[in-house]
Amino acid sequence: MPCTWCRSDDGGQRLTLTLHIQPGAKRTEAAGLHGDALKIRLAAPPVEGKANAALLQFLAGTFNVPLRLVTLKQGIKSRRKVVEIQQSAMGPEVLFQHAADADQ
């Protein structure tokens, strides 16, 4: 099944994700599809950039890359965001594995 919410460029060196963010959730996790975007629940409030910071930290930890390699490209004040992750050895499916690990 093709990934409608992710795109890999530069021979796999750059991963671009289209995300729909739900701030103020009980915990931070991937929550399935929302149209052509992946829904991410964030346990951070949508005030003063806290949700954006929490999102970038969550993605850096999930993809095991330094925070400086995760960039918010679009959607600073929107629920719909485009994030770029550089030099990740993992594909986008790691978001679903991370969610399954949290359930155990």
Image (spheres, helix red, strand yellow):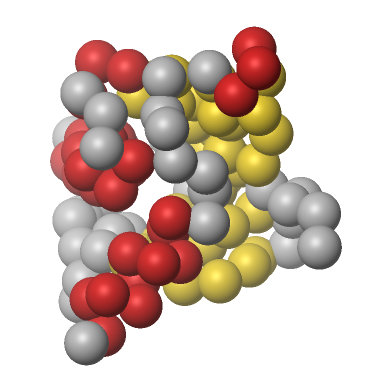
Q: From the viewer's perspective, is residue 25 above or below residue 85?
A: below
In the rendered image, the residue lying farthest to the bottom is: 104
Return the x and y of residue 62 as percentages of the image width and height: 29, 48
Q: Quadrant of residue 53?
A: top left
Query: Residue drawn at (64%, 12%), measured in percent from left and top?
Result: 10
* Count of numbered circles on the image: 0
Q: From the viewer's perspective, is residue 14 above or below residue 75?
A: above
Query: Residue drawn at (53%, 18%), measured in percent from left and top?
Result: 13
Query: Residue drawn at (55%, 29%), measured in percent from left and top?
Result: 15
Q: Quadrant of residue 51?
A: top left
Task: Give whichever of 30, 66 is nearer the camera.
Answer: 66
* Residue 102 in the figure: left or right of residue 96: left
* Residue 52 in the figure: left or right of residue 3: left
Task: Give whichever of 61, 71 is nearer the camera.
Answer: 61
- Can residue 55 be seen at all in this image of the molecule? no
Return the x and y of residue 82 as percentages of the image width and height: 55, 33
Query: Residue drawn at (43%, 19%), measured in percent from left and top?
Result: 86
* Residue 31 in the figure: left or right of residue 65: right
